Amino acid sequence: MIEVVLDTETTGLEVKDGHRIVEIGCIELQNQIPTSRKFHCYLNPERKVSEKALEVHGYTDKFLESKQKFSEIADEFLNFIENKKLIIHNAGFDLSHLNNELSLIGKKKIDIKKNIVDTLELARDKFPGSQINLDALCKRFRIDNSKRSQHSALVDCELLSKVYINLIDQKEPTLDFQVLENDKPNIDFKNYLYCKKIVYPTKKEIDLHKQYLKSSHKKNFF
């Protein structure tokens, strides 16, 4: 199962006020484990960043003016998320901004009713009446968010990938040991909090085990 954890940062809250995207971050998951595949970019929003947004993410107009425009990265972004389930915290916000950007360049919008998991809704169902922002969920699940001094799309994706696994009660993902050696997924285990080291038996241990089974069979037979 291939999924993509996605987050954006913007110039402000509302699309209707003309606000645009300044950063997109995506992390691919396979069987809930982060792979080495990521998509990340800063964008020139072609407008000024609001003061409130600047306080949240810290991306200044000067920093963003030299970055690519959304139209220049749109195809690469769409190829990255194509046919994959999107994991987003407060999906309505991010998708409204993404679909606005796609609409501005004449691209087909992302279907908000298809292959979308909103972790905000998952958290609301799981912990009714509790704080369910990303920081609060990290605290609840004892996930280190110390490097999140300000919002960053890619950092937030890394944290959300861990929060998501806890929300769906899948702390130790099921690994498919039937996969052939040459077809193993390209999984970056060092980025995964809950991964355990896999220890394979040696040839000597396998031979001793076979001998034990033979001797045990003879004893049971007689």
Image (cartoon, grey):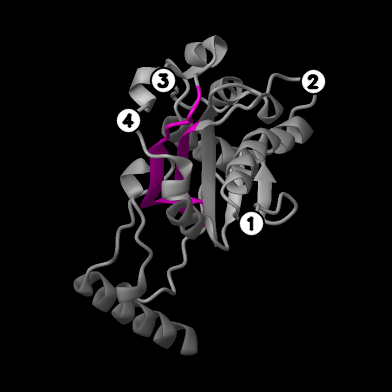
Report the disc number at residue 66.
Answer: 4
Amino acid at circle 2: Gly
Q: Nearer the viewer, mark 3 or mark 4?
A: 4
Amino acid at circle 4: Ser
Task: Report x, y in % for residue 85.
Answer: 60, 55
Report whether 221 appears left or right of 104.
left
Amino acid at circle 3: Tyr
Q: Residue at x 78, y 35 (%)?
A: 125
**Label 2: few (<14), some (14–19) or many (≥20) C-alpha neighbours in 10 Å:** few
User: What distance separates the C-alpha of mark 2 from that of mark 1?
Assistant: 37 Å
Task: Report x, y in % for residue 56.
Answer: 51, 15
**Residue that label 1 marks:** 108
Amino acid at circle 1: Lys
Sequence-wise, which precedes: disc 4 or disc 1?
4
**Residue that label 3 marks:** 59
Q: Nearer the viewer, mark 3 or mark 1?
A: 1
Sequence-wise, which precedes: disc 4 or disc 2?
4
